[in-house]
Structures are given as structure tokens and as C-alpha cells.
Image: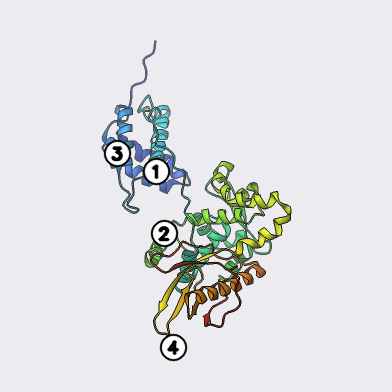
């Protein structure tokens, strides 16, 4: 009877380096695996021989990581992050058992993995979209284009940064992605706004559309968020926002959205299906279908109202500002008349948008502090004889 092959001694620290050099580098996500390898190598478990690491050691590493604070977010390391680190360790041990002879078992397999979180549901607010758009337009037109392309196409950051002119068909409105995150190619339809954004850059026959590296873009994104005091907004949240808006159109089914977004599993799109529940009502009642296309425009919006002690004529007046519309400011001699004026002005802007088919911002949250009020555009009033300052810009 032959004896089992002798175990080759190898520190987990060295095994991780070897795994990255021989296996990780061939993956599209090799940069992320580099960070995971570095994290594990800094833990005491990495100083043990591979064959001496036990399930208890793996469980201890898991619990340690879950107790740590993410320096960037100030929150605990997520379960998804730790799951990915354990998955890398498990893949390493499976390879080492078969090809390296540095262990006979995989201690990661039997250890409980952290629960998978429900995923981020961060939506881009109307105010954030306007502020970021204005900031990028004033400071960096490349970032302006990247920002709006993400919202229009649902492309990932890496997909946008790797766009090449020879893969963009402006005539048919399609951007071809030769290699995506899931390893396959994809054709992304370009809306009219997306095509205009690209045309404004000056269409070329070949070459990269953008000259940003991944790290350079991430740095520029963090600077923009910091200067605008926007908290907890990841660039990847724009992909979630774009997919949400595709469902909210009401004209695309799940398969069509999947073709645009590149999700290989329809289960990944289940988190967005709740956005379509209100649209099913109109499909059940055919007679209301046309009304439902217009009705979403005419909803109440939050506003700030303040009392100005002395106006131009020496009398008191009330002033109302709607945060979701930068230039919509209305004033009147009394609180009631100012609210009526704001309702009338809001109705005009929304009616014009509905006529043109333009998108209007979703109502934001009520402003903090006193003087908060909801302005209903369908409030029945006659045009008041007061001062208004409005703009048709949405």
C-alpha cells in the first residue's frame, strides 16, 4: 500500500502571493483580488503553514474582519466583503490541494459564511443630479459626459472608461462592449441624449473616448462629492439609478432591461421590480392608461416658506422656494397667496414638461427646520396678482 504524498510546507502568506501571480492576474477582477490578498496577508493567520490552518482559524479571521471598521465609510466591514475574501481563500486551498501538494483539505469549506446583504438601494436625488451636473459642466466636461452616460446607459464605470470610438456606431445608436465584467460582449443602445453627449466630444474614427484611468477617475469622483458635501453616493449607484429609470419607463420588460444592463441572471433584477408595481394598476384598467402617462407629472413638491418683514414697498411678504427646481421662487403678500402662486407656477412648469415629454425631478424630502410646506400643482386657484420669478429649466 503506497504512502500518501508528503505535504510540502508553505506559509499561507507565500501561498497567497503565488496564487495572485499565477491565477488572479488572469482574471478581469485581478485588482480587487490584489486588495483581498493584501488584507489577508496582514492578518496573523497568514504566518501559519497552509496545512496547519484550521476551521477555527478561518472562523476567527471571519469574526475579526466583521468587527473591523471601514476607514472610508466609518461603518463595519460588510458581510459581502468578507464572503469574497473567504471565497478567495477557498479557491486557493482547492488549487493547492490538487496542484501544489501544500495541503490535503480545505478548511474554508465547512466554515459558516456571513449573510449576504440585500444590496444597496441608494437612489440619486434630483438635487444631487443637478449639483453634480453643474459642477462637472463648470470644471470638467469629460466627467460631465461620463456622469450622464452612466445615468443614460446603465454602463459600469469600467465599461464607460474603456469605450473606444471604433466600437461606437453613432448612425444606429449602439456602443459595442467587446468584453464586460461577466466575460461576454454586449451592445448597449444609446439614447438621444447619450448620442449628443458623445457627439459633443468630437467623434473620431478610432481611439479611446476617455483618457481616465480607474484610479484617476475614482479620485476625481471623491473630490467632487467632497466639495459638494454629497454623502454615501458611489459611482456604481448611478447604474442602479439608470436601471430603475428603465423600469420606470413602463415600456421595457425585464428581458429588455437585462439586455441593456448586461445582467446574466434575471434574479439580479428582482430588486428593481418593485418600481413597476404602480404601473401594473394602469395595465389592469385600460381606460386609465392615457391618464396614468400624464398623472405622474402633477404631484406635490416640498418647499421652504419664509416671512420677509419688509418688502420693496415697506410691507411684509412671504417667499417660497422649491428645492427640486433651482429657479422656482415665488413671493406674495400673505402665506396663502404665496402658496397659491407657487402652485400656479409649478403647474406651468410641469405642464410644459408633460407636453414636451421631458423628465421632471422626483419630489425630494421635506427640508429641515421650520417653514416647510408641500406645494400641490393641482391646487384650484386663479392666477394671482403677485410677483413671481420662475424659469422653464427643469
Q: Secondary structure at mark 2?
A: helix
**Residue behind mark 1:** 81
Query: Can you tell which mark lies on residue 246?
Result: none
User: Can you name the residue that lies furthest to the top here?
Assistant: 1
Query: Can you tell which mark lies on residue 312?
Result: 4
Q: Is residue 18 above or below residue 28?
A: above
**Residue behind mark 2:** 218
Residue 73 at x, y = what percent? Answer: 35, 53
Of pointers 2 and 3, the one earlier in the residue sequence: 3
Q: CA distance from mark 3 to mark 1?
A: 13 Å
- Between 35 and 153, the residue placed more toward the observer is 153
Residue 99 at x, y = what percent? Answer: 42, 29
Q: Secondary structure at mark 1?
A: helix
Image quadrant assignment for residue 311? bottom left
The answer to whether residue 25 is left or right of residue 356 is left
Of pointers 1 and 2, the one earlier in the residue sequence: 1
Q: Is residue 183 visible?
A: no
Of pointers 4 and 2, the one earlier in the residue sequence: 2
Q: Is residue 126 above or below residue 312?
A: above
Q: CA distance from mark 1 to mark 4?
A: 60 Å
Q: CA distance from mark 4 to mark 3?
A: 65 Å
Image quadrant assignment for residue 79? top left
> Mark 2 against mark 3, which lies toward the viewer?
3
> Mark 1 against mark 4, which lies toward the viewer?
4
Image quadrant assignment for residue 104? top left
Q: CA distance from mark 4 to mark 2?
A: 49 Å
Tell me the quadrant of the picture where the C terminus can be found. bottom right
Of pointers 3 and 1, the one earlier in the residue sequence: 3
**Residue behind mark 3:** 64
* Residue at the spot 35% in from the left edge and 28% down from the top edge: 102
Q: CA distance from mark 1 to mark 2?
A: 19 Å
Amino acid at each position: 500500500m503506497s504512502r500518501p504524498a508528503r505535504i510540502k510546507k508553505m506559509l499561507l502568506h507565500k501561498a497567497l502571493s503565488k496564487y495572485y501571480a499565477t491565477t488572479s492576474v488572469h482574471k478581469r477582477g485581478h485588482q480587487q483580488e490584489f486588495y483581498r490578498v493584501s488584507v489577508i496577508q496582514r492578518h496573523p493567520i497568514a504566518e501559519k503553514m497552509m496545512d496547519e490552518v484550521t476551521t477555527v482559524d478561518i472562523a476567527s479571521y471571519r469574526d475579526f474582519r466583521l468587527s473591523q471598521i471601514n476607514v472610508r465609510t466609518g461603518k463595519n466591514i460588510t458581510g459581502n466583503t468578507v464572503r469574497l475574501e473567504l471565497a478567495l481563500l477557498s479557491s486557493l486551498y482547492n488549487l493547492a490541494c490538487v496542484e501544489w501538494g501544500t495541503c490535503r483539505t480545505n478548511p474554508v469549506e465547512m466554515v459558516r459564511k456571513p449573510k449576504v446583504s440585500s444590496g444597496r438601494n441608494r437612489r440619486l436625488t434630483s438635487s444631487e443630479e443637478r449639483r453634480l451636473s453643474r459642477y462637472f459642466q463648470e470644471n470638467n466636461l469629460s466627467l460631465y459626459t461620463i456622469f450622464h452616460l452612466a445615468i443614460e446607459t446603465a454602463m459600469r464605470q469600467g465599461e464607460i472608461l474603456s469605450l473606444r470610438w471604433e466600437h461606437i456606431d453613432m448612425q444606429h445608436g449602439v456602443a459595442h462592449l467587446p468584453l464586460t465584467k461577466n466575460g461576454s460582449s454586449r451592445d448597449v443602445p444609446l439614447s438621444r441624449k447619450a448620442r449628443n453627449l458623445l457627439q459633443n466630444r468630437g467623434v473620431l474614427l478610432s481611439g479611446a473616448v476617455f483618457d481616465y484611468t480607474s484610479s484617476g477617475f475614482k479620485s476625481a469622483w471623491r473630490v467632487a462629492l467632497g466639495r459638494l458635501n454629497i454623502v454615501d453616493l458611489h459611482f456604481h449607484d448611478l447604474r442602479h439609478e439608470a436601471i430603475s429609470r428603465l423600469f420606470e419607463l413602463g415600456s421595457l420588460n425585464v428581458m429588455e432591461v437585462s439586455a441593456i444592463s448586461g445582467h446574466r441572471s434575471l434574479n439580479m433584477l428582482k430588486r428593481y421590480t418593485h418600481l413597476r408595481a404602480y404601473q401594473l394598476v394602469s395595465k389592469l384598467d385600460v381606460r386609465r392608461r392615457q391618464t396614468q402617462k400624464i398623472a405622474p407629472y402633477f404631484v406635490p413638491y416640498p418647499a421652504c416658506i419664509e416671512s420677509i418683514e419688509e418688502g420693496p414697498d415697506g410691507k411684509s411678504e412671504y417667499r417660497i422656494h422649491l428645492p427640486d427646481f433651482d429657479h422656482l421662487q415665488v413671493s406674495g403678500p400673505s402665506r396663502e397667496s404665496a402658496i397659491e402662486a407657487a402652485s400656479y407656477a409649478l403647474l406651468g412648469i410641469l405642464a410644459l414638461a408633460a407636453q414636451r415629454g421631458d423628465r421632471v425631478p422626483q419630489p425630494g424630502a421635506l427640508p429641515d427646520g421650520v417653514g416647510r410646506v408641500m406645494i400641490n400643482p393641482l391646487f384650484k386657484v386663479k392666477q394671482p396678482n403677485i410677483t413671481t420669478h420662475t424659469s422653464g429649466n427643469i
